[in-house]
Image (cartoon, rainbow, N blue to C red):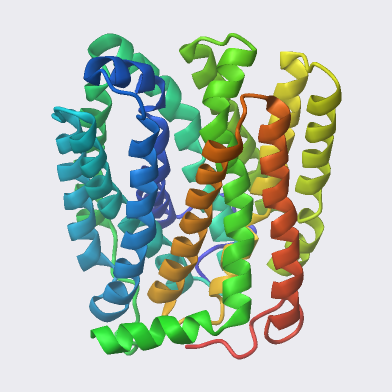
Amino acid sequence: MTLDSRSHRIPGWLLLVGAMSGVGPFSIDMYLPGFPMIEREFAEQGVERTMAAYLVGITIGQLLYGPISDRFGRKPPLYVGFTLYVLGAMGCAFASDMTMLTLMRVVQALGACGGLVIGRAIIRDRCQPHEAARAFAILMSIVSLGPIVAPTLGGWVITLVGWRGTFVFQAALGVALLIAMHSLLRESRDALNIVPFSTPHVVRTYARLLLDPALVAYSLLGGFAIGALFCYVTGSATVMQELYALTPQQYGWLLGLNGIAFLTASRLNVRALRSMGPAESLSRAIWWPPVVGVLLVASAAFVSLPLWFAIILQFAFFLCTARVTPNVTALGLAPHGKTAGAAAALMGSLQSLVSTLAGMAVAVFNDGTLATLALLMTAGVVLAVVCYFWARRYASGTPGHPDDGMET
């Protein structure tokens, strides 16, 4: 047993895995305050496409790291990943136009997603399902520090040295994580579970995983929940700053509140998992996001919301939705020990794909009003509830306890 339920001490390996997993989200939020400055420097609109390109890189890259880590171990692909991340960040820092910045963001994403996928696989390697749910909750609490720190730190760096400084900082962070991973992280993949690596075998592996309705349902459940949050991240820069006349620094503080919501949700989830399994915790948490979403839609549609009330509802929405995702990850990956890397990659790619589609939906339907943005967010969590019923129907073993029939 790698996590002592009686102890509040977080293992060092989990702290490192959290840092590696958090570098991707951190890299999204840090340069957000610099969007207007980037467009002015390049004399070109559409900086949002650099974020879309980053998400595409995350989606595709995860599918590569999973099978590679199942064959060669968890550490070797991380060397490649963090090297790509550093090179991509430096390419962004020296970008001469929007096209180059967009391409270098793809390279950076292809590196960043390695820590995200392999971090999940490492937890699956080292933890049983109930432990894994607690580990994923702790992981989320570490990752959630990124949205708290990144916008504020990014605004500070941008004020001092400009937007390019955010990418120099990210490159330095990548080097530090590469050194820490090399020095402190031990290989966790079972030497007896070496999975062949070839194109036909990878295709067969993903085809088999796609035919597991429980894994797909849990992946989409998490995807729609994360997509609902991403709707806010994508659309709120325009809505909140224009509707409430927020400065970029004030908007950065508002994004930081979302990280605090994630951190709070993580601690609540860890506490709940001391007395119940991940399935029971999920069954209690899944209903609250739609309730808060409907309240937000109704409030924004019929009254002019004061800023303080909009912030309270936003915080509640993020808090309730963040209670869902760690349990979903643990339940979805539990039966897939031998191919944990590929299963984690497929789950991550499906969730990133849904988030990308959510961002596209915001681009198409967002009319600058809080009501429309809230409606898109609520639609995401309602679809997550639909996927919950799908997942519950096909989950193996005792409903909500997938310990039976696990791969080893």
Q: With respect to residue 1, does 352 lie above or below? A: above
**Residue 150: which quarter of the image?**
top left
Residue 9 vs residue 60: left or right? right
Say left or right for 83 vs 344: left
Q: Nearer the viewer, residue 355 or 324?
A: 355
Q: Residue 213 location in percent, x, y? A: 61, 80
Nearest the viewer among 218 and 60 is 60
Q: How many labels does the image show?
A: 0
Residue at image location 57% in from the left, 75% down from the top: 215
**Residue 45: x and y, percent?**
34, 24
Query: Where residue 389 sits in the image (x, y, percent)?
Result: 77, 70
Q: Is residue 72 above or below residue 196?
A: above
| Quadrant of the rendered image containing residue 42 | top left
The reply, left or right, for residue 218 in relation to residue 180 is right
Q: Can residue 86 be seen in this view?
A: yes
Q: Residue at x 77, y 40 (%)?
A: 293
Residue at position x 67%, y 42% from top?
Answer: 376
The reply to whether residue 194 is visible in this rendering is no
218 to 7, vertically: above or below: below
Please name whichever residue, 47 or 286, is drawn nearer the observer in this view of the structure. 47
Q: Which residue is drawn at 20% across and 67% down?
A: 76
| Rendered location of residue 13, percent (x, y) | 38, 57
